[in-house]
Amino acid sequence: MGVLTGLEDLLRACAPRVLAAVTRRYGDFGDAEDAVQEALLAAARQWPAEGVPHDPAAWLIRVASRRHIELVRSEQARRRREAQPQDPPPEVRGDDELALLLLCCHPALTPAAQVPLTLRAAGGLSTAEIARALLLPESTVGQRISRAKQRIREAGARFVMPPGDELGARLVAVRQVLYLIFNEGSTASSGERLHRVELSAEAIRLTRQLRDRLPADGEAAGLLALMLLTDARRPARTGPDGALVPLAEQDRSRWHSGMIAEGVAIVTDALRRFPVGPFQVQAAIAAVHAEARSAAGTDWAQILGLYTLLAAIAPGPMVTLNRVVALAEVDGPEAALKALPDDDHYRVAAVRAHLLDRVGEHDAARAEFRRAAKGTLSLPERRYLETRAG
């Protein structure tokens, strides 16, 4: 199992770089994605028996390039590409994955198509993982990805950096996609592990690239700061047995001080120089948590104010729920229970359980903890909620 998991992680890490290189070389994103998938399948079959090559990405690029030529060869394509089979395979370039992100967020696609396509191509997530992240049926996500690739082909989209007047329109979707990738790595939506470090690390790497490329984008800076400040707490979020440790009970000496310092500096600078955006506000909330030396020393009044601001500029169910948590710390659990939304999501049930427990309604809290446990596919989360119910 360990060998297979290591191979899966390696293929996942290589896939976006390989796809970017093959797309840049041959131009057709849809055929390139198909060719890369076949190369990944070939690696999954051959490498366990033959060993992992010295340069896995180069091996995958060569195989995908050959398969791409086979896929597109026809009488017309042969006349255009007859000299290409002898060309050297393309190399990975530093800005390839950023260009791939922007291609997946082409204006010919709706946001509903941009997000799953980018998660698949640049994030390396499976269709099932994307479906869980977006709270959609797996079949729906698969159809959206297929239609999105076809739409890109029909639109004649090229693998180039978009002009300035198009760039801004694509950045909103790009940032949201990177945030979803990070969240899937930071708190996996299913499985035995709470964290999938390869995904959160990839999201941070791509967001650094985005910020470096677009230094005047305050929301790219805010997103990077949010990721750093959140990931800094990862070492303390699980115990030795892999059990989830809630924020209030974490050993803060295990938090990564370097990442916290970098994240605080980035969001402080962004809030000073750019118009305020949702990711900057979320990063500011994470910074308040990170700078508190203990749970008791957390400035909950400031956090409540920031969530109120966030609800005004980017309202959403999770913003509402997190604001309720902050409200409980400032005005008490009774006030928070009155403000809690009537929703069937397991996270709402978990918050309701905590609040009921605090006001002494332990039987009702136990029932809510159990209901929340049934709603999550994450085994660490489920075990934690079941433990609280017990």
Image (cartoon, rainbow, N blue to C red):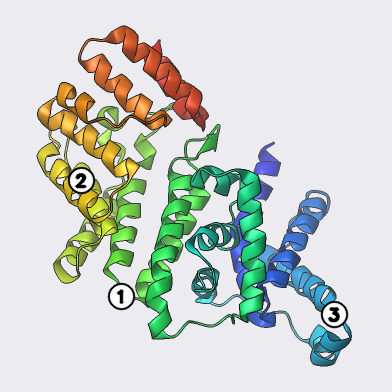
Image coords of residue 18 (percent x, y) = 65, 68
Label 1: how many Cα within 10 Å (few below 14, some 14–19, many 20+): few
Residue 126 visible to an observer of this rendering? no
Spatial separation of the CA atoms under disc 1 and disc 3 = 42 Å
Q: Nearer the viewer, residue 18 or 370?
A: 370
Q: What element carries label 3?
A: loop
Q: Is mark 2 on a helix, strand or loop?
A: helix
- In the rendered structure, are the residues bearing label 1 and label 2 in contact, judged by CB atoms less than 8 Å apart? no
Spatial separation of the CA atoms under disc 1 and disc 2 = 26 Å
Q: Which mark is residue 73?
A: 3
Residue occupied by mark 2: 307
Q: Identity of the amino acid at label 3?
A: Arg
- The relative height of residue 116 versus residue 363 in the rendered view (above or below) is below
- In the rendered structure, are the residues bearing label 3 and label 2 in contact, judged by CB atoms less than 8 Å apart? no
* Quadrant assignment for the C terminus: top left
Residue occupied by mark 1: 215
Q: Earlier in the sequence, mark 1 or mark 2?
A: 1
Q: Nearer the viewer, residue 198 or 171?
A: 171
Image coords of residue 104 (percent x, y) = 54, 68
